[in-house]
C-alpha cells in the first residue's frame, strides 16, 4: 500500500473510532460497535496479519464486555434502589425514543424521565421515584466510565496493530 493511502486509511479509521468513543456519551449510541466496525474495516482493507487477528479478537471481546457493562451497571444500580423491571423497561424505551426523535441528547433526558414517571406511577412517592432515578443516573455514570475506558483500550489495541503494519 502506498504511503498516502496507508496514512489516509489510518486517519479515517482513527476518526471513526474517535466518533465512536465520544458517541459513548449518548447511552443508546453503540460507540463500542462503531469502534469495532472501524477496526474490522481497517483489517479488511489492510489485510489481517497474525498480530492483527489476535488484536482484533481482543477488540471484539472488549466490545462485547462494553455492551454488557452498559446494561448491567445502569440497571443494577437502579434495581438496587428499588426500580421495578417495568420501570427499567420504560426507561429503556424513553432513552431509545429520545435518541431517535431528539438526537443526540434526547436519550439522556428520556430514560430518566420515563423511569421517574413509571416509578412515581407505581409507588406514588416522589422521594422513592427520585431515589430510583438517581440510581439510574449513577449507574449511567459508572457505565460511561467503564465503556469509555474500554473504548480507549480498543483504540489503543488498534493503534498497536496499525503501528505494526506501518513499520513492517
Image: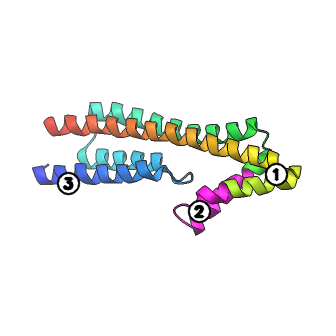
Instruction: Looking at the picture, tell me which residue is in the foreground, 98 or 133.
Output: 133
Which color scheme is applied?
Answer: rainbow
Write down the quadrant of residue 163 in the picture: top left
Residue stretch rendered in magenta on the structure? 89-111
Q: Tell whether 93 sits left or right of 68.
A: right
Give the x, y percent position of residue 65: 52, 35
**In percent of the image, x 31 and y 39: which residue is there?**
158
The earlier-in-sequence mark between 1 and 2 is: 2
The question of residue 93 being in magenta is answered with: yes
Q: Nearer the viewer, mark 1 or mark 3?
A: 1
Write down the quadrant of residue 107 in the picture: bottom right
Give the x, y percent position of residue 30: 50, 51
Q: Nearer the viewer, mark 1 or mark 2?
A: 1
Q: Tell whether 168 sits left or right of 36.
A: left
Residue farthest to the bottom, as pictured: 101
| Quadrant showing the C terminus | top left
Give the x, y percent position of residue 83: 78, 43
Instruction: Looking at the picture, tell me which residue is in the foreground, 126 or 159.
Output: 126
**In percent of the image, x 35 and y 53: which residue is there?**
16
**In percent of the image, x 34 and y 30: which residue is there?**
54
For mark 1, what is the residue? 126
Residue farthest to the front, as pictured: 127
For mark 2, what is the residue? 106
> Which type of secondary structure does the marked residue at label 2 adopt?
helix
> Which type of secondary structure does the marked residue at label 3 adopt?
helix
The earlier-in-sequence mark between 2 and 3 is: 3
Q: Nearer the viewer, mark 2 or mark 3?
A: 2
In contact (CB < 8 Å): disc 1 and disc 3: no
Q: Which mark is residue 8?
A: 3
The earlier-in-sequence mark between 1 and 3 is: 3
Amino acid at each position: 500500500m502506498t504511503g498516502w493511502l496507508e496514512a489516509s486509511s489510518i486517519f479515517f479509521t482513527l476518526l471513526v473510532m474517535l466518533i465512536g468513543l465520544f458517541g459513548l456519551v449518548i447511552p443508546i449510541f453503540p460507540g463500542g460497535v462503531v469502534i469495532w466496525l472501524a477496526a474490522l474495516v481497517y483489517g479488511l482493507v489492510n489485510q489481517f496479519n497474525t498480530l492483527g487477528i489476535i488484536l482484533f479478537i481482543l477488540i471484539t471481546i472488549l466490545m462485547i464486555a462494553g455492551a454488557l457493562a452498559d446494561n448491567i451497571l445502569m440497571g443494577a444500580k437502579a434495581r438496587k434502589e428499588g426500580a421495578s423491571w417495568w420501570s427499567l423497561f420504560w426507561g429503556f424505551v424513553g432513552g431509545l425514543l429520545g435518541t431517535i426523535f431528539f438526537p443526540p441528547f434526547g436519550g439522556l433526558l428520556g430514560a430518566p424521565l420515563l423511569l421517574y414517571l413509571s416509578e412515581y406511577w407505581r409507588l406514588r412517592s416522589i422521594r422513592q421515584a427520585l431515589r430510583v432515578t438517581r440510581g439510574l443516573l449513577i449507574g449511567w455514570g459508572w457505565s460511561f466510565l467503564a465503556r469509555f475506558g474500554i473504548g480507549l483500550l480498543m483504540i489503543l489495541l488498534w493503534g498497536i496493530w496499525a503501528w505494526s503494519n506501518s513499520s513492517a
